[in-house]
Image (tube, rainbow, N blue to C red):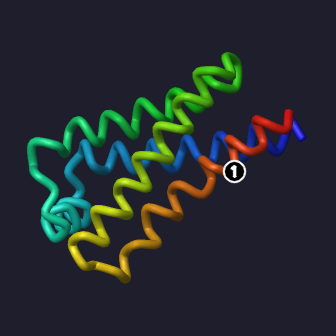
Amino acid sequence: MRIAQIVVTLLAALMAGFSGVVLLMRAQWIVQALNDYRVPRAWWTPLGLAKAAGAVGLVVGLFVPVIGVLAGCGLVLYFLGAAITVARARWYSHIPFPLVYAAPVVGALVLGSLA
């Protein structure tokens, strides 16, 4: 069970980290989406840093479980908020994207609770 937890946690951290880095780097496709969803430009850096911090927290959580749980809960709330933001912007076909990023985080939390 521990190996599955490590693999899923690292996958979740990689996905959240990637999401945070592309936001911080202002990749064109993410900038376009954030503009479409009407996310204020002033929020972009803090949101990218939050995802990157969550990714680091998941990895640290492999050694200090309470950090991983806090990071995981924060990321789940973040991605649920992203799904709500997408829905409020009426881009219903894009709602699955933040949920895809949330899924491995939920998996990591579940596997961590079973370990």
Q: Amino acid at mark 1?
A: Gly
- Residue 61 vs residue 15, the one in the foreground: 61
Q: Residue at x 18, y 60 (%)?
A: 31
How far across and down, in percent of the image, does residue 4 sit? 82, 45
Quarter of the figure with residue 94: bottom left
The answer to whether 32 appears left or right of 92 in the picture is left
Q: For the residue labelled by badge 1, is the local secondary structure a helix, a strand or a loop?
A: helix
How far across and down, in percent of the image, does residue 58 sit? 58, 32
Viewport quadrant of the C terminus:
top right
| Mark 1 neighbour density, 10 Å: few (under 14) some (14–19) many (20 or more) | some
How far across and down, in percent of the image, does residue 23 sit? 27, 49
Location of residue 36 with respect to 19 vertically, above or below: below
Quarter of the figure with residue 81: bottom left
How far across and down, in percent of the image, does residue 10 sit? 64, 40
Look at mark 1 in the image and give the residue it sits on: 107
Location of residue 38 with respect to 58 vertically, above or below: below
Viewport quadrant of the N terminus:
top right
Q: Residue at x 16, y 70 (%)?
A: 36
Q: Residue at x 76, y 36 (%)?
A: 112
Residue furthest right in the image:
1
The answer to whether 21 appears left or right of 69 in the picture is left
The answer to whether 109 appears left or right of 3 in the picture is left
